[in-house]
Each structure stands twice: as structure tokens, then as C-alpha cells.
Amino acid sequence: MLCTASCIIHWPTACPGVGLLNFSTDPDASETPPIWAADRPRSARAPKVPGRFGAFSVLQAAFASQAKELPNLVQGLAGTVKAVFGVKPDPDFTSLAEAPRTIFNVNVTPQRRVATQATSLERLKAIGEAAGGSINDVVLAASSGAMRRFLLELGELPRKSLVTSIPVALPRDSSQAGGNAISFANVRLGTDIEDVRERFDVIRRSSTAGREFLKQMSTKTLMDYTVLISSPQILTRLPGIGSRVPPTYNVIISNVPGPRGKLYFLGAEMEAYYPISALFHGQALNITVLSYAGGLYFGFTGCADKVPHLQRLAVYTGEAIDELEQVFLGRGGDKKVGKGRKAGKGRKAGRARKARKVGKGRKTRKA
């Protein structure tokens, strides 16, 4: 007996494993406790040592810790601000001011649509090794190729490259009950580039530069840094304002490590693990990828009223993986790869094509 599970917990909010606490690695297990009764590893609490000033001692220690991290935080913020004005420590580093406005960066409605795609982890690993990048680079390249094609068809592809925000996991105590310590890095997706190899190289270099920039800060500093640079995005949650705030990125693409072995629920095998994520004003599309038992599962969550034909994006992602495989491994048949149509002028290009069709006097009908 097989079952398919969909995760509705996004990893910046909670660890995906929390949603699977009542699953078992034993196919013969006949009873599984509910989530609230499942055993969780707990670390031993250190004995409390009363300070000279009681509770004020804790506050004093907190201020001392923050003061110690302040120079490192100022250095990180200064680098971010300089990058906005074009002064970068690395030309491949992507600043918070490079993202163009797209159809993904609008106010959302309550309507949602979900699409999925699946592939194997081994397949993407082979592509990454042949291309000189990581599995995450391949995930970004496949998503980039799909979005480029998707937006071209709609006449909405900007001349500037789309920018994604990728979560970067920070070191944390694995014995904690849930949650994640993360920061974010902006990465260019190279959607303005036709050539597949060149586009992949842009993604790889931009991803590396973003991670290297974060490494100059300690874990404690990065937590404060993440809160501060994310503050402007709080404005996007306000109705009527979200679509007017310039986007610091166009879409979040998360690659989340999941269970490596098979999981079971009352003897039924979980055969797939598709993630579903949250949307908010200014972010009408989210792409989350989750690994499970050797597979890699893409979950596309979009606002149905703002992102049309979301299923096409999932299909194009599968075909973009085929394209990457053919380019870097020489597999995938005789499909023409490596080139695509040039980026148009966005909405104007789309309207111009529609106007030419109408001008020929042909009858039109609704799809």
C-alpha cells in the first residue's frame, strides 16, 4: 500500500521533519503517536547560576554579547549598503537593488494554485558535477530556465535578470525541538541570458559570492543581520503597499533537505513529499524543493489570479532539467538546446504582438 504526503510547512517557519513526527521508518509499525505525543530529543538544561543582580544579570550579559557582535554586524550592513550603490566586494555579489519588477511582484488575492514536478537527486548531482556546481545550483538553473520560458511566452520577461532569495542554513543545536536558524542570500538567475552554459555559470558565481559574503559574519551576527535586511519587506504585507515597494528579490527558491530513508504510516509507504509554501503581497510565486529518499520534489505555489497557467512552469522545469542534462552530460535525445528567444520589452512586447494579431482582422475566441 502506498500513500503520498504533501508538506504544508515551509522551512523558514518550521523544520519539515516536524510534520512527519507521526511517520515511522519501520514498515511493520502498527501504531504511531500523534504529533503532540511523539518523543523528541531534548538537551539537558544547564543549571541556573544566580547573578549578583538577579534577573538584571541576564540582561547585562545579553547587552554585553550584542556589543561584542556589533562591529561584525556594522561591517556586514556596510557591505550591503555599498553594494546597493554599486560598490561590491565581489562583482558577482547580488545586491538588494538589482531585482526588476515582474508579474510575480504584485499584491496577491486569496486564490491559490499548486503545481508539482519530481526528479531524482542522483540525476541533479550528476549534472552539478559535470557543470562544476552544486545540486542547489542545478535547482536554481532549472527554475531559471523554466521561468525564462514561462515569462517569454507571456511577453513579460524583463531585460534585467530575475533575482532569487535563497535560504542559507546556519549552524544550530540539532537537539532543539524545531525551527531553523537561517539567513538569506540574493542570487542572479541569468534569465536575460540565452545560452544554458553561460546562464548556469552566472548562477554558480552569484550563489558562491552570496554565501561567501555571509561567511564573514558570525552566527549570532547573522541572526541580527537577517532581521535588519528583511525589515523593508515587512511593508509588502500591508494591503495596497506591497506592489509599490521595489522588490529586493523576485522569488524565493528554497532547497530543503528531507528524510533520506523511506517513511511509513501504519505500514503504508510514503512515496512522495511535495512541499507547499506561503505567499504574501509582493510575492505571488514561491518555489520550494524538498528531497526525500533519493528523490527531489518541486512544489510551485502561486496566486491563481496573478500567475496564470502555473502548471506550465512545473512542466518547463522538468524540460529545463532535460536541457541541462543534454548540455552538460550529452543525454536527452535530439532536442534543440542552449538557445532561446531574446528577452523582449516586457509588457509592451506582449501587447504589441497581440495588437498585430488583432490588426489582421482575424476572428478571436476565448480560450
Image: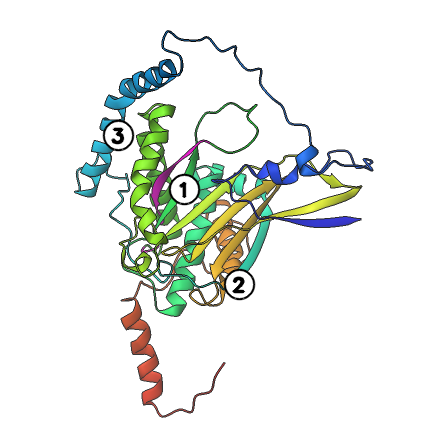
Mark carried by residue 166 = 1
- Which numbered disc flags the more N-terminal residue, 3 or 1? 3
Residue 24 place in picture, x, y as percent? 73, 35
Residue 41 place in picture, x, y as percent? 63, 23
State the residue position of label 2: 311
Q: Nearer the viewer, residue 257 or 294?
A: 257
Q: Are marks 3 and 1 in contact (CB under 8 Å)?
A: no
- The amino acid beneath tag 3 is Gly
Q: Residue at x 31, y 32 (%)?
A: 225
Q: Quadrant of residue 88?
A: top left
**Marks 2 and 1, Cα distance to the nearest angstrom?**
22 Å
Q: Is residue 336 left or right of residue 99?
A: right
Q: Nearer the viewer, residue 2 or 119?
A: 2
- The amino acid beneath tag 2 is Gln
Up-down relation of residue 239 to residue 48 (above or below): below
- Residues packed near mark 2 inside 10 Å, few (<14), some (14 to 19) or many (20 plus): some
- Residues packed near mark 3 inside 10 Å, few (<14), some (14 to 19) or many (20 plus): some
Q: Nearer the viewer, mark 3 or mark 1?
A: 3
Q: Is residue 120 left or right of residue 343?
A: right
Q: Are marks 3 and 2 in contact (CB under 8 Å)?
A: no
* Residue 143 belongs to magenta span: no
**Marks 3 and 1, Cα distance to the nearest angstrom?**
18 Å
Q: Quadrant of residue 73?
A: top left
Q: Is residue 268 visible?
A: yes
Q: Nearer the viewer, residue 13 or 194?
A: 13
Secondary structure of the residue carrying numbered label 1: strand
Q: Residue at x 33, y 73 (%)?
A: 350
Span shown in magenta: 181-192
State the residue position of label 3: 76
Q: Residue at x 70, y 33 (%)?
A: 37
Q: Nearer the viewer, mark 3 or mark 2?
A: 3
Up-down relation of residue 236 to residue 341 (above or below): above
